[in-house]
Image (cartoon, coloured by chain):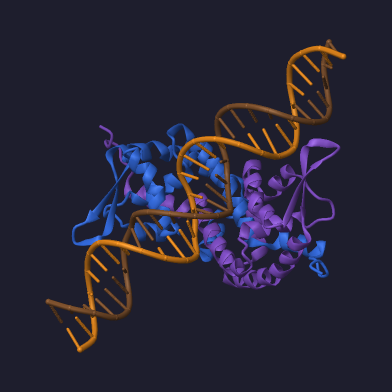
Chain colours: A blue, B purple, C orange, D brown
Amino acid sequence: MSNLNPVPFATTLRIRDACLCLHLQRAARVAARRFDAAFRPLGLTNGQFSLMMALNRPDAPTIGSVAAILAIDRTTLTAALKPLERRGLVSVEVIATDRRSRRLALTPAGRALLAAAVPIWEAQHDAIERRLAGDAERLREELRALA
Amino acid sequence: MSNLNPVPFATTLRIRDACLCLHLQRAARVAARRFDAAFRPLGLTNGQFSLMMALNRPDAPTIGSVAAILAIDRTTLTAALKPLERRGLVSVEVIATDRRSRRLALTPAGRALLAAAVPIWEAQHDAIERRLAGDAERLREELRALA
DNA sequence: AATAATTAGATTGATATCAACCTATCTGAC
DNA sequence: GTCAGATAGGTTGATATCAATCTAATTATT
């Protein structure tokens, strides 16, 4: 009885072609692998690069605000900070005026590593933009609309 | 010495605005959360849905071919199959003519669950396409070019 | 037929991701 | 000042992700 109404193969093909979620996951995985490979000499992943870049601002942000910027769960960010803290690249401090909050900042070593990563990002990003059929800015707009 | 050449804040802003990798990760995470929430009553994630859909074809595919379709590592697929096998939704069998390979197939229960998931996908996908500023097909083309 | 090279997956270890649930802290209403 | 509600994070458990490394099986070379 459980396969009286199976999904027709034509439906599978239609969904596989159309599913923006799958297309996004695929493209995100490929891009992540590319950047991960490029950053590997520095011992960074693409996510760690984006996280550290989000901390490179005049006023040290909190966990919640960085999680919102990266569109990740707060608990994911808590976990992601651990290896960076262990390596002395990032500091996490309770804020005195609101002891619930944490102030996130790059250490000098973190700033130095980030500076070394920027040229790698430039090269990879140029390569990726060249692969696009059309306008990179329009793609970014669509991705922003989805996020 | 390690922060003699820090990354200027302007560079941070430029990279954060431009980085396609970050934009992709963000959009992929948001889309994943939406579909995960929609599929939750069925106990499926977006990735499990895409995986099962990839198995819904006349000729049972192998691990390597499905990994290529989904653009995931073979070892990731090996791990992803485990919970679906445990739940009796997917079967994994050694192929007699090439005992290195595995034949992946949906079970009757898997086909039934997939059929129940399709209307949920339809609704979510309509909602996502409505959020796009422009043409969904052009976005898919760009994502295909990147993957 | 023996052996080298290739191919298909599995295992291990590390990080990533989130839901569900928890604690600590702050703010507002009274 | 107390207490309820809201807010900021942390912890746990499950799955996701990949690199590095391994085994088993097949194919190609000789």
Q: Quadrant of residue B130?
A: bottom right
Q: Residue at x 71, y 65 (%)?
A: B113
Q: Is residue A121 above or below residue B52?
A: above
Q: How far across and down, in percent of the image, does residue B92 sit?
A: 75, 47
Q: How far across and down, in percent of the image, does residue B47 sit?
A: 63, 56
Q: How far across and down, in percent of the image, does residue B132 sit?
A: 58, 68
Q: Is residue B100 above or below residue A91?
A: above
Side of A105 relative to B64 (left or right)? left
Q: Nearer the viewer, residue B44 or B69?
A: B44
Q: Is residue B110 above or below residue B1?
A: below
Does the image show residue A23?
A: yes
Side of A91 relative to B117 (left or right)? left
Side of A91 relative to C5 (left or right)? left
Viewport quadrant of the N terminus of chain B? top left
Q: How many marks?
A: 0
Q: Quadrant of residue A110?
A: top left
